Amino acid sequence: MKDVKCECGHVNPHGTVLCEACGKVLVEESPDKSLLDMRYEGSARRSQTYNKTIVDKIWNFFSSVKVGVWLIVITLVASAAGTILPQEMYIPPTMPAEEYYEDQYGWFGKLYYELDFNNLYSSWWYLILIAMIGISLVICSLDRVVPLYKALKAQRVTRHEGFLKRQRLFGISENGDHDDLAVVKQRLQAKRYHVREENGDLLAEKNRFSRWGPYVNHVGLIIFLIGGMLRFVPGMYIDKVLWLREGETKVVPETDGQYYVANEKFILENYDKDKDKTFEAAIDRAGMVVKNYQTNAVLYKRVGPAIPGEQPELEKVKEHKIRVNQPLKFESFALYQVDYKLDELNTMSFSLTNKESGKAFGDIKVNLYDPKPKYDLGNGYAVEVLSFFPDFEFSENGEPTTKSRIPNNPAFVFKMISPEVPKGETSFVAIQQTIEPLGDNQYKMAFKGIETKNVTALTVRKDLTIWIIIIGGILFMIGVIQGAYWNHRRIWVQNKNGEVWIAAHTNKNWYGLKKEIESTILETKLIIPDDQMQKERNDKEGV
Amino acid sequence: MKKRRLIMRTLILFILAAAVAYTLYANLTKDNRMKVEVGKQAPDFVLVDMEGEKHKLSDYKGQGVFLNFWGTWCKPCEAEMPYINNQYNHYKDKGVQVLAVNVSESELAVNHFIERKKLDFPTVIDTDGQVQAAYGINPLPATFLIDKDGKVVKYHTGTLTEAMVREFMEKIKP
């Protein structure tokens, strides 16, 4: 566990493969290879050097890129598994999830549910996987970027022979001279190389910042993950749905009763084949094509304090036509158009009719959200509502009952009072169904018509994390661009034993580097270095 | 040097672990994170009952309040109503008040229900859902027990048995 002193005098941390300063090979990793492994400049990755305490062991586990890749692979497989069957949030709410999966998909569905795959993306183990990727990112990056930075900073111009010889691009020119070096230096500078000179040796380097690309990218990812994490902090992220009937005013959830929103009108427009000629073919093929979903909304703010339940005093803030991607915005909230239901029943009309003569004795119009107990028609005629079932069905024991409070299938028990039958006759009236439970009636409630209203659904959205996520995303892309579109190139031109040695290294695009060297040493006595890897390969293939 | 490294690693791992632990905790509790927490003051509200009388929660200071949210279509709500009614008659003179908040149904439906079930305690209708929003009501039935100081003692969702109703009322008896 001691630092290693190189023959050039530089002290390297334990575990260093190539001397940070001169590049001499300190630890021969694979002697059979003639080329050096230049990853991380042969610097000592810290994880691999200390392995004593439990903290070090955890650290080393996460520092391994292999572990990181496996974590990503496992997460990918798990994420894919979550798409085999629909997630619980997307299944119809008519049935408990437990039954739904088995009912729809058999044993596989049951297994899927039992393994908690129905809420996969918010399950604890999935979150732990993501978290482990995040930890792996932080530790891998830290363990590599610090030594790499130090090694690149500590590098000297003059390099050890063994280092130069074992670079991929390498060549020896026996009769180069000082003039050639001067020309090369000048040309390299013209190509925006940063050229350092020591004892007549040259080190030309450019685009070192490209090496930081992956780490900038990782910082972006970490910020992105932090943004995702902040969504769990109360008040940072709200995503609720608010259903509003036309004419209804409701409190906006999560605003502490401060804001109310009214739906004045919901509009659904289709493309008209005759007007929008451009789309004629498409409309013919697809049938109806919706052009616009729109809620004419009014936002109100409550004036003064109010106790819930009390009629609030409201002040109009603004009107807005909410369309897809044109939300109504206020403070940090936005109301988006998300769903709708057309023609929900609102009122039903009936006329009290004598069955025999067919004569009507007055109409009643029942508001399905607030039916009256009695409708007086005058002259001794009246209708009482004995029972009302907004969402009618027969229960298990055969009694009429209601499934919900929404008038999807309204049914009534009416008592019809007439001069002939002042005690009243009972009639059960549902849609397309009349039952006279107490024998034949003289009168009936003849169905006259309905009025409907449209219902809109608005998403109430507040997201204070979005900017963090955007910044993370931008950094991510900057990192990618930084690492992808620039290459870190180094060219060593050095005097060894009266010869001129040229070696070069880049992290990508060796061909480009070679071309650059060729044009640099054009018309000098220097020889173009060989691509040793290419040569090796050619030798193997026997070319 | 080595020691510093150990401290650094421990610190970084600790921060990461804390962030992960918090996220997991927040995620697992997000579904049952209540708007109204046990031990906190119950949000005040005013609603009018079927007789036209105003009921303001804070006016019941000094009494325990059995606050029940229900709907006429909700079977478990219907099942527990007679129990609540029995126990209400038993405890009403002992300082326990029952307030049954119907969730935005029509007066007609509520009145019929009260008649059918012969309920004696005051029933109010939260027509525009403000009280439900303030209490974060989702599944029905939902029952809050509020003590004489206006603090929430317990929250329960799901059907109650008569024994449970009695136990609950005993809990908030001043």
Image: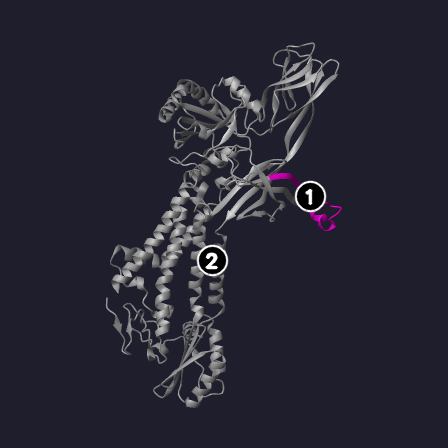
Q: Is residue A342 visible?
A: no
Instruction: Give the mark nearest the N terminus, 1 or 2.
Output: 1
Q: Was residue A263 drawn as part of the magenta stretch in this picture?
A: yes
> Measuring 43% from the left and 36% from the top, which residue is drawn there?
B36
Vertical comparison of A515 with A278: above or below: below
Q: Is residue A94 visible?
A: yes
Between circles 1 and 2, the one closer to the viewer is 2
Residue A23 vs residue A139, the one in the foreground: A139
Label 1: which residue? A270
> Measuring 58% from the left and 39% from the top, which residue is drawn there?
A314
Q: What is the x, y in percent for residue A539? A: 41, 74
Q: Which mark is residue A415?
A: none
> Measuring 38% from the left and 24% from the top, which residue is drawn there?
B169
Residue A367 vs residue A146, the one in the foreground: A367
Q: Mark 2 belongs to which amino acid?
A: Gly
The quarter of the picture where residue A346 lies is: top right
Q: What's drawn in magenta, residue-wise?
A: A262-283
Q: How many marks?
A: 2
Quarter of the figure that contains the N terminus of chain A? bottom left
Q: What is the x, y in percent for residue B149? A: 39, 31
The quarter of the picture where residue A266 lies is: top right
Residue A121 vs residue A220, the one in the foreground: A220
Residue A274 left/right relative to A437: right
Q: What is the x, y in percent for residue A422? A: 66, 10
> Measuring 75% from the left and 47% from the top, which residue is drawn there?
A275
